[in-house]
């Protein structure tokens, strides 16, 4: 048997580097909330022990966008 230096099934270092670069967040967007909205977000984060508000907001926005795409898929013709 040949001696393998890599674990079976693990991606190559080149692939990992490219994948990491693709996932890097480089685009900034600013969102403004009023006092009631931020109080609601703060209360939610306290109640459910959310550590990252930006992750919460990012996931919420992307979930809403994906739901719309799922309901209205693009047509071919």
Image (tube, grey):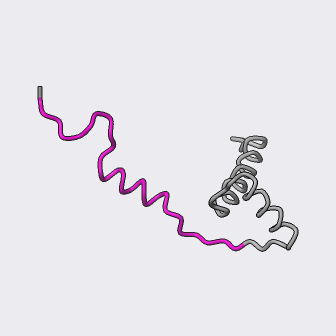
Question: Residue 16 in the image: x percent, y percent?
Answer: 36, 51
Part of the protein shown in magenta: 2-30
Residue 41, by quadrant, is: bottom right
> Which residue is rendered at x = 88% and y = 68% of the image?
36
Which residue is at the front of the view, 50 or 59? Answer: 50
Residue 38, by quadrant, is: bottom right
Question: Residue 15 in the image: x percent, y percent?
Answer: 35, 50
Please tell me whether residue 51 is drawn above or below residue 63 in the rendered image.
below
Question: Residue 26 in the image: x percent, y percent?
Answer: 53, 69
Please tell me whether residue 70 is drawn above or below residue 16 in the rendered image.
above
Q: Is residue 29 left or right of 19 when viewed as pictured?
A: right
> Which residue is rendered at x = 68% and y = 57% of the image?
56
Question: Residue 66 in the image: x percent, y percent?
Answer: 71, 47
**Magenta-highlighted stretch: main secondary structure?**
loop
Instruction: Name the image quarter holding the N terminus.
Output: top left
Please tell me whether residue 16 is drawn above or below residue 29 in the rendered image.
above
Magenta stretch holds residue 63: no
Residue 18, by quadrant, is: bottom left
Count of numbered tags: 0
Q: Is residue 31 left or right of 21 when viewed as pictured?
A: right
Magenta stretch holds residue 24: yes
> Which residue is rendered at x = 23% and y = 40% of the image?
6
Which residue is at the front of the view, 57 or 35? Answer: 35
């Amino acid at each position: 048997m040949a001696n393998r230096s890599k674990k079976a099934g693990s991606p190559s270092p080149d692939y990992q580097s490219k994948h990491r670069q693709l996932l890097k967040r480089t685009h900034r967007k600013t969102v403004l909330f009023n006092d009631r909205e931020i109080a609601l977000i703060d209360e939610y984060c306290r109640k459910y022990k959310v550590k990252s508000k930006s992750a919460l907001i990012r996931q919420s926005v992307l979930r809403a966008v994906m739901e719309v795409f799922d309901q209205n898929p693009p047509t071919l013709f």
